[in-house]
Amino acid sequence: MGTPPLSPATEQRIALLFAPASQEIARTLLRKECGNNLPFCAKQDEIAMERIRFAALKLSGGSLEKLRDAIRLAKIDWRDLLVAAGFADDIHAHTRWLPSRSW
């Protein structure tokens, strides 16, 4: 399986968090660095990856540097990323998170 694409819900959150000039970089980081390359995620599709990708986006607050930091954490142990984002105790918490436009 190749790297899962970004889901429409992931695209929506990118558009809210990142200014237009940074959105493609954020997309590329999530597709290439926060996908099937993560531990135990080899067979996950774009919907299954939302929880981890949303956590990275939430911690980024619209900053590419913070997004890179969140992805680095996910590569070590994405469960720590879920805890940091507040998505660890409720498997549906990420679906209720919708950021306000931050740019």
Image: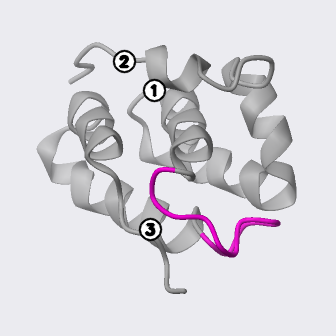
Residue shown at 27%/37% (left/top)? Answer: 18
| 34 or 61, nearer to the observer | 34
Question: The N terminus is located in which quarter?
Answer: bottom right
Q: Which residue is mark 1?
A: 61
- Amino acid type, mark 3: Arg
- Residue at 44% across / 68% down in the picture? 31
Name the residue rendered at 38%, 32% in the picture.
Answer: 62
User: Is 46 left or right of 9, judged from the image as shown?
Assistant: right
Q: Earlier in the sequence, mark 2 or mark 1?
A: 1
Q: Quickly name the residue at label 2.
A: 98
- When the figure is inspected, residue 82 is found, relative to residue 35, above or below; the finding is above
Q: Earlier in the sequence, mark 1 or mark 3?
A: 3
Magenta span of residues: 36-47
Whether 85 is drawn above or below 46: the answer is above
Question: For the residue labelled by badge 3, is the local secondary structure a helix, a strand or a loop?
Answer: helix
Secondary structure of residue under mark 1: loop
Q: Amino acid at mark 1?
A: Gly
Picture quadrant of residue 80 = top right
Mark 1 vs mark 3, CA separation in Å: 18 Å
Q: Position of residue 102 (x, y in %)?
A: 27, 20
16, above or below 29, in the image: above
Mark 2 vs mark 1, CA separation in Å? 12 Å
Q: Earlier in the sequence, mark 3 or mark 2?
A: 3
Residue for badge 3: 31
Q: Is residue 53 left or right of residue 15?
A: right
| Mark 3 nearby-residue class (10 Å; few <14, some 14–19, many ≥20) | some
Q: What's the coloring here?
A: one colour
